Image: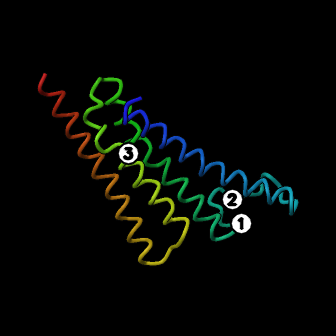
Amino acid sequence: MTTTALAVLAFAAWHLFLTGLIWASRAFLIVTTGKAANSFKPDGTDVSPFSARLCRAHANTYENAPYILGLMLLALVTGHGAITDGLALAVVGARVLQSLIHLASTSVMAVQARFLFFVIQWGIAVYWAWKMFSMSTVA
């Protein structure tokens, strides 16, 4: 498995993990408190501040998936994995760190750190897109 393919798997696994946390916390509340399964707000604000942060971290992950996963998958299917291999795990690591900070706190410092990890992901994606566009105009 190439580094890029491993990063795609890791990104998907991280998203599955966050989804599982939402599912497990809601299932726990349904079983222990009798809360109706159809009564949860999508943003998690009706459960707890942590639940709201968890739902937002989950949403951040799928909101950024199209360009992060899209570029990695494009590189894989076009045989240009060398473009993404070097930074593929770094972009996933930045995604995980952004989510973990989001789960931990909404302090000013935490929000600034979260933004830094977002900018790292975005910058890597812009670099990959530029490299892929450059490759497509050479041929």
Seen at 43% across and 71% down, the residue is 111
x then y, percent, for residue 31: 86, 56
Q: Mark 2–mark 1 contact, CB under 8 Å?
A: yes
Q: Is residue 123 left or right of residue 51?
A: left
Q: State the separation of the CA atoms marked 2 and 3.
A: 33 Å
Q: Mark 1–mark 3 contact, CB under 8 Å?
A: no
Q: Is residue 135 above or below residue 48?
A: above
Q: What is the number of callouts on the image? A: 3
Q: Is residue 114 above or below residue 84?
A: below
Seen at 43% across and 53% down, the residue is 95
x then y, percent, for residue 126: 26, 46
Secondary-structure class at tag 2? loop
Q: Pick whichever, 49 or 89, lies toward us.
A: 89
Q: Quadrant of residue 119?
A: bottom left
Seen at 35% across and 24% down, the residue is 77
Q: State the separation of the CA atoms marked 2 and 1.
A: 8 Å
Q: State the separation of the CA atoms marked 1 and 3.
A: 33 Å
Residue that carries the numbered disc 2 in the rendered image: 41
Q: Amino acid at mark 2?
A: Lys
Residue that carries the numbered disc 1 in the rendered image: 47
Residue at the far top: name it. Answer: 139
In the rendered image, the quadrant that contains the N terminus is: top left
In the rendered image, the quadrant that contains the C terminus is: top left
> 10 Å neighbourhood of mark 2: few (<14), some, or many (≥20)?
few
